[in-house]
Structures are given as C-alpha cells and as structure tokens.
C-alpha cells in the first residue's frame, strides 16, 4: 500500500517527518525513514530501509538503494547513486560516553561535513568515512572503505580505497590518450566522450594512491 502527496509516492510503512521537504515525483518505499529538516529533491528513489538523517540535503534524480544510511553532515548533489547498504558516516571520534562516564549528547561531539558530488556512484556495501567527499562522476567500488577525498571521475576500490582509473559520465572506464597543458586527455571507448583529468589527480593514479 502506498500513499501520495503533492506528486510524491510514499509507502505506508515509511516514516517521513512533517518537517522534511520532498520534491515532486520522488518515490519513497517501505520502511524508509526521513528525518526532520531533510530536503529531498525531485524524481528521487529511496529504496527499502533507507535512512536520511536530520538536515541532510539530497539533490534531484538521486537513487538510494535498500538499506542506505546518510547521516547528517553529508549532502548529495544531483544524480547521485548509492548502492545497497552504503553508509556515509559523520563522527571521526565515536564514543557512547564522555570521559566522565556520562552519556554523550549532541553537544558533546562535532559533526564532520562532506558531500557526494553530481553524478557520483557508490557501490553496494561501501563506507565513506567522516569528512570525506566524493567528486563529480566518481565511481566507488562495492565494499570499498573510503578514507580520503575522491577526485572527479576517479574509480576507487578496496580497503582503504585506492585510485585505479577514471570513469566517463556514462560509467565506463576512460582510456589515456595524451598529455595536454591542462592535464591528461582521456577518452571513453563506449560513448566517445573525452575528459581531461587534472595532472595532480592523474599523478595519484601513477603513484597508486
């Protein structure tokens, strides 16, 4: 059973705060929780059991698969894909209690802020650590543990995640063509798109970082 409001489809078991904003044509499926202050754009899909924390901002046409956790401090730009079980974390120094043994409250720790940028994709089961951002059209492999910022178009895999290549807008891997004054020109053999990767980012690939 689903219910609709203002062109938004919400499953009967979902919990969407009255203090959240949800854009038109967004679909929210079973057991999703969207907290107060969250802003979700238009034409998004939130799969079963996804959790969107307080004040999180999600752009248009994003896909959050089953069991995704987006904690406050993280924001998603337009067109972001989060695979099943992805976790975007926000506490660099997690503890349940303070040094004096009292239970920690919201005022006893600092939220680490970060962003997943336009068109990026994060594979199922990946974990992005607090304060770590993911660049435009980057591709994070399934199960990766991302410990440092990911450049635009980068493909990162493993634990800790390492740079293994660069991805086209269409998702296929780019092929090195030639150096230019702006960086390394790369081309997609699937769609023909050409992308120039800044030299500093390309050097990380050469160094295996």
Image (tube, rainbow, N blue to C red):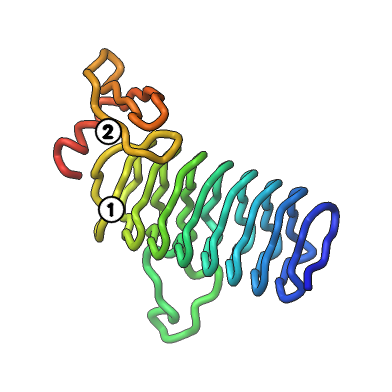
Question: Is 208 situated above or below 104?
Answer: above
Which residue is rendered at x = 72% and y = 71% of the image? 15
Determine the secondary structure under disc 1: strand
Give the class, few, some or many, for how many residues have Cα within 10 Å of label 1's Cα (few <14, many ≥20): many
**From the image, which quarter does the N terminus lie in?**
bottom right
Instruction: Tell me where residue 162 appears, x and y as whole percent.
Output: 24, 49
Disc on res. 62: none
Say left or right for 46 vs 142: right
Which residue has dot 2 on it? 201
Q: In the current view of this chain or complex, which residue is farthest to the left?
A: 207
- Residue nearer the viewer, 66 or 55: 66
Instruction: Tell me where residue 43 appears, x and y as whole percent.
Output: 69, 48
Quadrant assignment, res 78: top right
Find the distance from the CA under tag 2 to the CA under tag 1: 16 Å
Q: In the current view of this chain or complex, which residue is farthest to the bottom?
A: 101
Which residue is rendered at x = 67% and y = 66% of the image? 29
Give the class, few, some or many, for how many residues have Cα within 10 Å of label 2's Cα (few <14, many ≥20): some
Question: Is 62 situated above or below 176?
Answer: below
Which residue is rendered at x = 46% and y = 60% of the image? 88
Determine the secondary structure under disc 2: helix
Instruction: Tell me where residue 79 appears, x and y as whole percent.
Output: 56, 43
Question: Is 87 situated above or below 141?
Answer: below
Question: Is 144 situated above or below 51?
Answer: above
Q: Can the viewer see residue 80?
A: yes
Which residue has dot 1 on it? 157
- Residue nearer the viewer, 156 or 149: 156
Between tags 2 and 1, which lies in front? 1
Say left or right for 50 vs 177: right
Q: Can the viewer see residue 90?
A: no
Instruction: Tell me where residue 99 appears, x and y as whole percent.
Output: 38, 80
Which residue is rendered at x = 77% and y = 48% of the image? 24
**From the image, which quarter does the C terminus lie in?**
top left
């Amino acid at each position: 059973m689903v219910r609709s409001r203002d062109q938004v489809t919400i499953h009967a078991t979902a919990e969407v705060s009255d203090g959240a904003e949800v854009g038109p044509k967004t679909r929210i499926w079973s057991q999703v929780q969207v907290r107060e202050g969250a802003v979700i754009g238009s034409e998004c899909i939130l799969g079963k059991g996804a959790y969107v924390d307080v004040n999180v901002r999600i752009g248009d046409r994003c896909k959050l698969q089953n069991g995704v956790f987006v904690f406050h401090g993280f924001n998603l730009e337009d067109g972001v894909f989060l695979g099943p079980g992805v976790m975007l974390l926000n506490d660099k120094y997690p503890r349940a209690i303070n040094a004096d043994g009292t239970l920690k409250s919201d005022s006893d720790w600092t939220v680490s802020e970060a962003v997943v940028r336009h068109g990026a994709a994060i594979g199922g089961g990946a974990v992005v650590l607090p304060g770590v951002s993911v660049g435009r059209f980057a591709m994070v492999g399934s199960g990766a543990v991302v410990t440092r910022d990911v450049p635009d178009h980068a493909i990162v895999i493993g634990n800790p995640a390492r740079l293994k290549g660069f991805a086209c807008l269409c998702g296929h891997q780019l092929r090195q063509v030639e150096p230019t004054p702006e960086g390394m020109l790369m081309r997609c053999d699937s769609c023909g798109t050409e992308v120039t990767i800044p030299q500093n980012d390309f050097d990380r690939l050469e160094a295996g970082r």
